[in-house]
Image: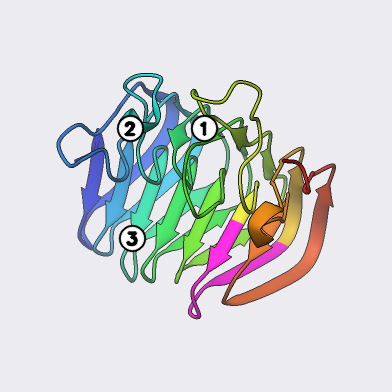
Amino acid sequence: SAALLIHGTAGSLTLDGGTVSGNVDVTSNLSIGSSIQIKSGASFTMNSGSITGNGISAYSQGSIQIKGAGVYVTDADSSFTMNGGSINGNYARYGAGVAVENGAKFDMLGGEIKDNKFCHGNEGGGAVFVNNATFNMSGTSVISGTDYYDPSKSGNSVQKNGGGVYVQGTNSSFTMDGGTIMDNAADDANNGGGGGVYISGGTVNLKNGTIKNNKSGIS
């Protein structure tokens, strides 16, 4: 379950300010989307405000969400439009800021997804995880500052793959037509890498924007 669950084609919500913070799913093995879930054709528009500090109930690997602690979007015709605001400081094993999958769509036209923490997973995408879904980035949007959190290993500060954006699945699509992906990190041990963007499937179109100051090859 989630703090905010928008379900069905008649479901629609707009965030024009305020904060969604400190939520964790304790009813389903800490699985997905403790803060905001959009599913079954629902829609969400974020114009301002913040989604922050979700997905962790204690500082240990076993108490952290699997994916989408900030925002989880799933199912065909479900959509999230981000015009502004911030998704930051969320914790998950992958896709800590945003997870979008199963035919859903996330359009990032502005705002920032930053300083989210990836922990103890075999996937990646500390900021954004895309699995058989669509992620579009443009305008003044920024994805930055993702790093790895492992309470059992002092000093381990990077994740496995795709510090900023991780794309997988043959039906995935990632289009970058503006915005910036910067200051994220990934470890390329075990065939990982992609400090800014990691692609293991789907279609990627890089039309415009900036990918800079990301790091890989750090162990």
Seen in the picture, residue 176 relative to 76 is either above or below; the reply is above
Of tags 2 and 3, the one toward the viewer is 2
Residue 101 or residue 147, whichever sits in front: 147
Q: Amino acid at mark 2?
A: Gly
Q: Alpha-carbon neighbours of circle 2 within 10 Å: few (<14), some, or many (≥20)? A: some
Whether residue 162 is in magenta: the answer is: no
Seen in the picture, residue 62 relative to 40 is either above or below; the reply is above
Alpha-carbon span between mark 3 and mark 1: 22 Å
Identify residue for label 2: 62
Whether residue 170 is in magenta: the answer is: yes
Seen in the picture, residue 203 relative to 18 is either above or below; the reply is below
Q: Image quarter for residue 201?
A: bottom right
In the image, taking residue 142 as reference, residue 200 lies left or right, namely left
Of tags 1 and 2, the one toward the viewer is 2
Identify residue for label 1: 48
Seen in the picture, residue 76 relative to 176 is either above or below; the reply is below
Residue 48 or residue 122, whichever sits in front: 122
Of tags 3 and 1, the one toward the viewer is 3
Q: Alpha-carbon neighbours of circle 3 within 10 Å: few (<14), some, or many (≥20)? A: many
Sequence-first tag of 2 and 3: 2
Q: Amino acid at mark 1?
A: Ser
Alpha-carbon span between mark 2 and mark 3: 24 Å
Looking at the magenta stretch, what is its main secondary structure? Answer: strand
Identify residue for label 3: 74
Q: Which residues are magenta?
A: 166-176
Locate residue 145, reporting x and y percent: 68, 33
Q: Which mark is residue 69?
A: none
